[in-house]
Image: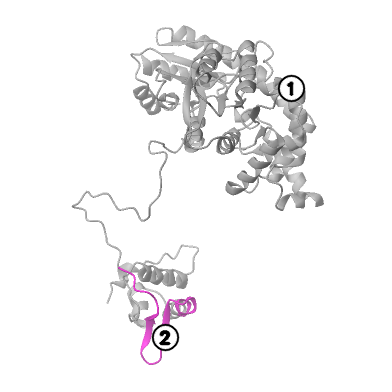
Amino acid sequence: MLPYKSLIQIDRDAPVTLYIQVCNSFISLITNGSLRPSDLLPSSRLLAELIGINRNTVKLAYEELISQGWAEAIERKGIFVLSRLPVISKTKLPDPNKNNKPEEAFLWTNRFKNAMPSLNLQKTTLAIDDGFPDVRLAPVDLLMREYRSLSRKFYGRNFLKYGGSKGSEHLRISISNYLSNTRGLDVSAENILITKGSQMGIYLAAQLLLNPSDHIAVGISNYASADDAFRYAGANLLRIPVDENGMDVDDLEAILQHQKIKAVYVIPHHHCPTTVTLSVERRLKLLNLAKEYRFAILEDDYDFDFHYNNKPYLPLASIDHNQNVIYIGSITKTFAPALRIGFMVGPSAFIDAASSLRELIDKQGDTLLEEAFAVMFDNGEMDRHFRKTLKIYKQRRNLFCQILKSDFNEQITFSHPEGGLAVWANFNEKVDLIKMSEDASKKGLYIDNGNFYKNESFSTNGMRMGFASLEENEMVEALGILKKVVQ
């Protein structure tokens, strides 16, 4: 007989009733091969004594086993494991004396062998991040008020049903108006797809634009998650230099003389990671090349709303008269990262196809949340939020750069960013960024180790240093810790 006293553990404080706990224990013993078809189970009296519960509880457990089809009762003989169950080989325990890698239970393809799950920044208290907004400034209470208000109204119940994969029509109209007012981009709601942030838009566009072995032009320094999305589609990345005026479009033109490409991925405002802006001359030339060579421009404009010194240049999509541009933006990158709302703008047929593809991985977004955001756009709350945070982030940028210049003059070189939420910092080669990150963590500060920004063509000893999410006292504390670490 099996050692049931040790195999069946009872937790009297658990929310699951005792007889179900006993039943589940027997199911586990059957499915791991410890009990085989037609094996006799111990009598209810004996098992009750062994595990210290009431006999009637054991009887209920056996009745449940029988009703679920795991056991059968044979008159005057007892309770047996159902004889018709297939024989399951007993699970082998790993040999502690061997260091063998366990065999995979099934075959699968890992296209990201070096990828690691992203860091959970919700658990950090003090962080110099990649350039995220301060969620404490977001009018979340107003957003949730609209969310609750909609859910209580009789017509709001309809938003709990399946909706269109393009997203809330109300929000698409609101974003259409918002893009027209802020960017001079005149598009209808039918040309807009609501996404779960800009990353979903990049992924969907990559899947539609790129076939295996196609070529897409990207910056030598580039947003690594976009690179991964393009590689996942099977594309080859053509690296284009990026200087203080953005992507070198002359270099791209030289490549186009002998190489066909399907698309160019560009971040015109506050290029990620280096924060530079694409000049007007290069914007116009890029559009002309797209028209001449018939390739798509995937414009990632995640950071448009935060410009401190001058008005931002119009996006490529706003001056594109040939419909070569697919425009991707994010609302939550400027509001709160966890509230996943982004958008993609493009030709109606392309947006329809992207919507159909989106259904394969995510049937639709949170319609109530999208409707609540639409109300926030319509009543001016989003505009007030952008104007308020723009002033605060400008002050934080100025203080952050002032401290970097005075306290890190020998360790960090940087340019004063004209917009965005981060500084691109090049560290002295003597600074080991991995060790710096580890040492800072021990002192209570999260800061990246720079590896995210590196690729096969770009390995500068640098990183983005976000200032927007830090209040002034937190900024002084964080940079004070960093100063001790790098020195």
Q: Residue furthest front?
A: 258
Q: Is residue 34 shown above or below 453? A: below
Q: Quadrant of residue 52?
A: bottom left
Span shown in magenta = 63-89
Name which residue type carries label 2: Ala
Check the picture and name the quadrant holding the N terminus. bottom left
Residue 111 in the image: state x and y as whole percent: 42, 40
Residue 18 in the image: state x and y as whole percent: 45, 70
What residue is pinned by disc 1?
182
Q: Is residue 402 visible?
A: yes
Check the picture and name the quadrant holding the C terminus. top left
Residue at position x 63%, y 16% in the image: 283
Q: Is residue 305 visible?
A: no
Residue at position x 55%, y 15% in the image: 249
Q: Secondary structure at mark 2?
A: strand
What residue is pinned by disc 2?
73
Residue at position x 40%, y 43% in the image: 110
Residue 327 in the image: state x and y as whole percent: 65, 28
Q: Answer yes or no: do the residues labelled 1 and 2 have beta carbons within 8 Å?
A: no
Q: Is residue 284 shown above or below 63? A: above
Q: Residue furthest bottom?
A: 76
Q: Who comes first in sequence, dot 1 or dot 2?
A: 2
Q: Quadrant of residue 339?
A: top right
Name which residue type carries label 1: Thr
Residue at position x 47%, y 62% in the image: 14
Residue 363 numbered mark, or none: none
- Circle nearer the viewer, 1 or 2: 1
Q: Is residue 446 shown above or below 67? A: above
**Mark 1 vs mark 2, CA separation in Å:** 75 Å
**In the image, residue 132 lies in the stretch drawn in magenta:** no
Residue 486 in the image: state x and y as whole percent: 37, 16
